[in-house]
Image: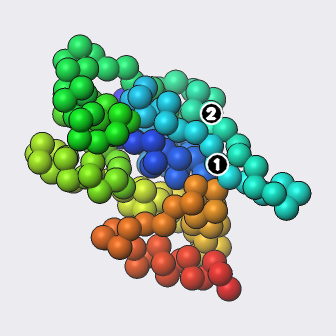
Amino acid sequence: MLRRKILLDACVAINLAATGSLDRIANTLQVTFAIAAQAAVEVGYLRDMAGGQTVPIPINLKQFEPGQVVEILELTPAELKLYIELAAIVDDGEAATIAIAIQRHMDLATDDRRARRLCQERHLAEPLRTVSLLRAYVDAAHLADDQIQQLITSIRERASFQPPRSDPDLKWWNDHAKQAEY
């Protein structure tokens, strides 16, 4: 069975990796997360605490079975030309992600405001966001409140992510984030 592919930019990939459940999220949503090679290079580290100190932990996207959880995509010649044009507007990872989405008609996920605006200008479907993907996973997996709180805490602490005020799921995030603080 072919799984639907969702292109992630580096930031969304980092946020989802911070949960420690990237494979469960992909399998529950029945998707394969794709990432442009240029964006994969931008996926660096998570932050963990060890001995009272913050320690960088490298993210290894290649640890997952290719084509099942994460697939790293190389640009085709047509995508490369578009990528060069878009890289003058947004970062390399977002430019490659958007070029692939346009050429291959794929859904993409980004929280980056400039990238989202560029998608709109290029008549792409509204990009998904970290919180919308997380919420879809939570709903599909029927997670309990304490499990949701742990996911949000992991993303906040390990990836230093806070959704922008414009995120349509900000209230959902904040409601669960507040519960995690008690």
For label 1, the crowd category at 10 Å Cα-Cα, with few meaning under 14, some 14 to 19 and many 20 or more, is many
* Residue 97 visible in image: no
The residue at which mark 1 appears reads as: 46
Q: Type of residue at label 2? A: Asn
**Horizontal placement of 17 versus 132: left or right?**
right
Tell me the residue at 26%/52% (across/down): 114
Image vertical order of residue 50 relative to residue 38, above or below: below
Name the residue rendered at 36%, 55% in the picture: 111
Q: Between 32 and 155, which is closer to the camera in this rendering?
A: 155
* In this view, 116 is above or below 178: above
Query: Is residue 174 visible in the rendered structure shown here?
Result: yes
Give residue 103's position: percent from left, percent from top: 19, 28
Q: Which amino acid does label 1 sit on?
A: Leu
Q: Is mark 1 on a helix, strand or loop?
A: strand
The residue labelled by disc 2 is 60
Task: Looking at the image, tell me whether mark 2 or mark 1 is earlier in sequence order.
Answer: 1
Q: In the picture, which quadrant includes the C terminus? A: bottom right
Residue sitting farthest toward the top: 77
Name the secondary structure under disc 2. loop
The answer to which of 84 and 48 lies nearer the viewer is: 84
Which mark, by number, is residue 152? none
- Residue 20 in the image: state x and y as whole percent: 64, 49
Rendered location of residue 141, percent (x, y): 52, 59
| Horizontal arrangement in the rendering, residue 143 relative to residue 171 (left or right) | right
- Marks 2 and 1, how far apart in space? 11 Å
Residue under the point 81% across and 57% down: 53
Describe residue 15's horizontal placement relative to residue 33 as left or right: right
Extreme-front residue of the structure: 88
